[in-house]
Image: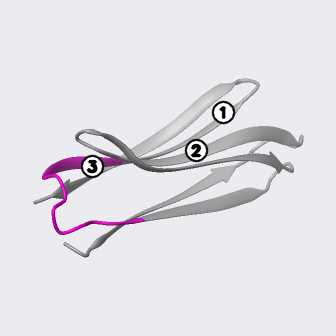
Amino acid sequence: AGDTITGNGTITNNTSKTLKVVAELEITSPSGVISSYYENHTIRGGKTITKTIVYTVPVDAEVGVYTVTLSATGKNGTSSATEYVTVQ
């Protein structure tokens, strides 16, 4: 209770062209989404952006596994990464 779950993610454009992407950073409890962040970005070739989302776990938080997911969607599809946090 009172602890925080912090999701940090980076999105790198590893091409030489400028890309438009939608960044989504989301924290999900066993019952569903509890915190999310969405934003459109234009990333120049070779550049990286960093995004952070913070969730404070309430005293009566649901026990179980929470997920922190970062995804980036562009014209060529979606790439994502997920981490897991156990709340007891």
Q: Which residue is mark 2?
A: 24
Q: As rendered, which of 47 and 55 lies closer to the eye?
A: 55
Provide the residue span drawn in magenta. Answer: 55-67
Quarter of the image with the C terminus in it = bottom left
Q: In which quarter of the view is residue 76 placed?
A: top right
Q: Which mark is residue 73?
A: 1
Question: Type of residue at label 3?
Answer: Tyr
Residue found 27% across the figure and 66% down from its top: 57
Q: Give the structural element (helix, strand or loop) at label 1.
A: strand
Residue furthest to the bottom: 2
Q: Do the numbered discs 3 and 2 sit on residues whose CB atoms are within 8 Å?
A: no
Residue furthest to the top: 76
Please report whichever mark, 3 or 2, sits nearer to the chain's N-terminal start. 2
Q: Do the numbered discs 1 and 2 sit on residues whose CB atoms are within 8 Å?
A: yes
Question: Type of residue at label 2?
Answer: Glu
Q: Does residue 25 belong to the magenta stretch?
A: no
Quarter of the image with the N terminus in it = bottom left
Q: Give the structural element (helix, strand or loop) at label 2.
A: strand
Residue found 89% across the figure and 40% down from its top: 17
Q: Which mark is residue 41?
A: none
Q: Is residue 77 left or right of residue 59?
A: right
Q: CA distance from mark 3 to mark 2?
A: 16 Å
Q: As rendered, which of 58 and 11 lies closer to the eye?
A: 58
Question: Type of residue at label 1?
Answer: Thr
Q: Does residue 64 belong to the magenta stretch?
A: yes
